[in-house]
């Protein structure tokens, strides 16, 4: 089956993007008329090739949420530092986003990202609206394309609905009430109102019901990487959950699991990747390793993938560098991680040196990490406890097969040290700390998720600093949806309908059994168990912040308790402030229970931020609507979120999406 590698017409890209930037941009005059505003797009989109180009832009844009194409940022990291799973770790940057409660304001979103590139909040706002406008382009022009039958037009429209719905689902859980844009903007509009979260959810649910009807199944398509019926079902299930339609959500997941031809991968398959240098880090082949190799994600033998994102090669128009090994591994290759006898513990070994030893080439197999983000202790340790014990056989947490890298798995490779060949240590024999910055330089890594081949840099035998092995990405196909998530969504739907349903555990155990776990769920399952299993299974696939906030809404709407017995109210779960441990949303409770936030400042030896104080406020349930977007909307009012400067509960908002759509043509 072919993969999408189509080139994008730059004129089409400019038309779509120029309109979307009416809602935000990097300059003060982004609402000023632009020559592109006067371009007549009717001719461009009067043919199927024009629609394909616009759809290609939508498809490509999905992977730009996971990786922004420069050497300092993985976009999705922002989603994870607003969760219990990760925190910012770029301690060489004074403005690293860690003191979120005090640093995050309606104006900081642009300044912080541009200054230190330690978060992507502003990127999410402007690029998500760009993606919405791309989808709107297809929706608006598809019916006018001659020569297409009704089914083909509806398939295009359904895919565009998916893209628009995916982005609006993100926006309403990142930013709350936001402007609803469903049409191509022909002249600058400066009198938007925000539209209520639930109204937007209702609109995109209707759109996805259409998409499920008309978009083909993957088995009936010639290309992989395009939106298919299974992806539409998955997103529709999430919308149904958010709206409290739990039985309908379960119905969609039942179809995905039992009636769509997908299956969890139970055995090894595809191409075996030896991990770059098996003499340094041997891999015992296993299904979890194979499942997450980029070269196996989109092949026909993989029955678990529902929608993947093709990403390979060097073509700038289609390939995005997925710098997981640079951004997400610890920064260990300098003198600030020492041996017990005071030497640098880990060196960059170069293959063209006479004394090169392939048993210790850690930079080649793990890359040169700089740890822009790091996992929490919960993420690397306590998350893996089930039935009160850390599961010894879970392949997703196993160093013995090579899937997981613990710091003690590194062995000192500096021959000048008496510790050569011994495990790297955190303390010497007298209890003295051997690592100057434990935030950035000492943590475990899910290697099976983050390892990527880089054939270009693999040829660099001299090993120039920062360009070794897999640090720059080569084959980086990624999952957007796979069947494992359908099991987790079904378990969630069952929980809201009846938290005592004995079959909830079966959905979680299906994943645990596949991962060769010893510990299985046997009794009542809590929402915390479900969210923990999501974290184990979908790390760096799911949008963790968005999913936690969606579940926060579901708990408030359903009245079901969380794992601590708390219940939440729709009236105020997202309208509280403070950093104390009580109250707030489920999202906030997960963060204060499991992360570094609100635990006090940490003392480290770092060049930029030697006293990081990780804080999170209940008000950060939603990110602030950017001040740049509010001021650009000079003839109307956008609603600011609770707790931020500019919040006014009396700001008028659209309560239903039909009124918001009708207002789009009014520009005065």
Image: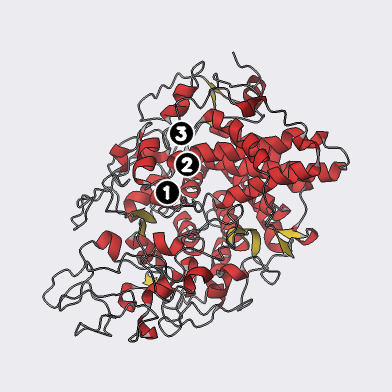
Please, what secondary structure does the residue beneath circle 1 have? Answer: helix
Mark pair 2, 3: CA separation: 10 Å
Q: Are marks 2 and 3 in contact (CB under 8 Å)?
A: no
Left or right of residue 281, residue 286 in this image: right
Quadrant location of the N terminus in the rendered image: bottom right
Q: Is residue 639 visible?
A: no
Relative to 219, residue 22 above or below: above
Q: Residues within 10 Å of mark 1 (few under 14, many from 20)?
A: many
Residue 652: image location, x then y, percent: 51, 19
Nearer the observer, 565 or 9 = 9
Residue 162: image location, x then y, percent: 67, 44
Kindly report which numbered mark, 2 or 3, lies closer to the viewer in this rendering: 3
Query: In this figure, which residue is indicated by the disc labeled 1?
Result: 78
The residue lying furthest to the top in this view is 668
Nearer the observer, 422 or 229 = 422
Identified at 71% across, 63% down, the residue is 258
Query: In this figure, which residue is indicated by the disc labeled 2?
Result: 123
Residue 70: image location, x then y, percent: 45, 52
Query: In this figure, which residue is indicated by the disc labeled 3?
Result: 26
Relative to 9, residue 28 above or below: above
Q: Residues within 10 Å of mark 3 (few under 14, many from 20)?
A: few
Left or right of residue 256, residue 43 in this image: right
Mark drawn on residue 569: none
Kindly report which numbered mark, 3 or 1, lies closer to the viewer in this rendering: 3
Left or right of residue 254, residue 105 in this image: left
Q: Quadrant of residue 106?
A: top left
Q: Is residue 33 visible?
A: yes
Identified at 59% across, 62% down, the residue is 312
């Amino acid at each position: 089956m072919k993969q999408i590698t189509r080139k994008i017409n730059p004129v089409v890209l400019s038309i779509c993007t120029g309109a979307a930037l009416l809602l935000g941009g990097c300059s003060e005059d982004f609402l000023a008329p632009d020559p592109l505003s006067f371009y007549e797009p009717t001719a461009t989109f009067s043919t199927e090739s024009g629609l394909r180009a616009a759809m290609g832009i939508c498809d490509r844009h999905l992977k730009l949420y996971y990786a922004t194409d420069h050497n300092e940022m993985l976009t999705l990291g922002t989603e994870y530092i607003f969760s219990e799973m990760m925190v910012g770790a770029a301690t060489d940057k004074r403005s690293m986003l860690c003191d979120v409660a005090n640093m995050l304001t309606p104006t900081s979103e642009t300044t912080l990202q541009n200054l230190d590139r330690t978060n992507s909040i502003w990127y999410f706002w402007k690029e998500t609206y760009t993606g919405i406008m791309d989808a709107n382009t297809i929706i608006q022009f598809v019916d006018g394309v001659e020569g297409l039958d009704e089914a083909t037009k509806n398939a295009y429209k359904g895919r565009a609905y998916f893209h628009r719905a995916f982005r609006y689902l993100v926006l309403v859980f990142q930013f709350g009430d936001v402007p609803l844009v469903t049409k191509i903007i022909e002249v600058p509009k400066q009198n938007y109102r925000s539209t209520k979260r639930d109204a937007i959810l209702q609109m995109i649910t209707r759109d996805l019901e259409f998409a499920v009807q008309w978009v083909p199944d993957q088995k009936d398509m010639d290309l992989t990487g395009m939106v298919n019926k299974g992806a539409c079902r998955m997103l529709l299930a999430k919308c149904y959950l958010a709206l409290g339609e739990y039985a309908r959500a379960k119905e969609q997941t039942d179809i995905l699991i039992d009636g769509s031809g997908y299956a969890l991968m139970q055995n090894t398959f595809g191409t075996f990747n030896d991990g770059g240098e098996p003499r340094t880090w041997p891999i015992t082949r296993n299904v979890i390793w194979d499942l997450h190799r980029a070269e196996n994600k989109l092949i026909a033998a993989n029955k678990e993938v529902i929608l993947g994102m093709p990403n390979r090669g060097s073509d700038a128009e289609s390939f995005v560098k997925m710098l997981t090994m640079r951004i997400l591994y610890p920064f260990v290759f300098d003198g600030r991680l020492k041996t017990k006898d005071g030497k640098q513990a880990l060196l960059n070994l170069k293959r063209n040196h006479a004394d090169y030893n392939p048993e210790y080439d850690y930079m080649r197999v793990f890359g040169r990490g700089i740890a822009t983000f790091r996992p929490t202790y919960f993420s690397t340790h306590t998350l893996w406890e089930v039935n009160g014990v850390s599961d010894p056989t879970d392949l997703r947490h196993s160093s013995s097969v090579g899937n997981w890298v613990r710091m003690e798995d590194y062995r000192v490779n500096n021959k000048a040290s008496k510790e050569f060949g011994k495990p790297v240590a955190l303390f010497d024999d007298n209890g003295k700390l051997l690592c100057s910055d434990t935030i950035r330089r000492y943590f475990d890594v899910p290697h099976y998720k983050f390892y990527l081949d880089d054939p270009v840099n693999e040829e660099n035998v001299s090993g120039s600093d920062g360009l070794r092995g897999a640090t720059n990405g080569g084959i980086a196909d990624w999952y957007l949806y796979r069947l494992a998530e359908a099991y987790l969504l079904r378990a969630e739907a069952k929980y809201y309908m009846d938290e005592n349903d004995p079959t909830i555990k079966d959905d979680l155990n299906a994943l645990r059994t596949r991962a060769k776990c010893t510990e299985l769920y046997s009794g009542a399952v809590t929402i915390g168990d479900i969210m923990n299993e999501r974290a184990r299974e979908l790390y760096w696939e799911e949008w963790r912040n968005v999913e936690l906030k969606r579940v926060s809404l579901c708990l408030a709407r359903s009245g079901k308790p969380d794992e601590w017995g708390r219940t939440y109210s729709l009236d105020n779960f997202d309208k509280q402030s403070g950093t104390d441990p009580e109250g707030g949303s489920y999202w906030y409770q997960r963060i204060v229970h499991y992360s570094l936030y609100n635990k006090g400042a940490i003392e480290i030896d770092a060049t930029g931020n030697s006293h990081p104080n990780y804080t999170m406020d209940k008000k950060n349930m939603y990110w602030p609507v950017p001040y740049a977007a509010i001021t650009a909307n000079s003839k109307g009012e956008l609603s600011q979120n609770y707790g931020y400067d500019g919040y006014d509960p009396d700001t008028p908002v659209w309560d239903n999406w039909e009124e918001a759509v009708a207002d789009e043509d009014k520009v005065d």
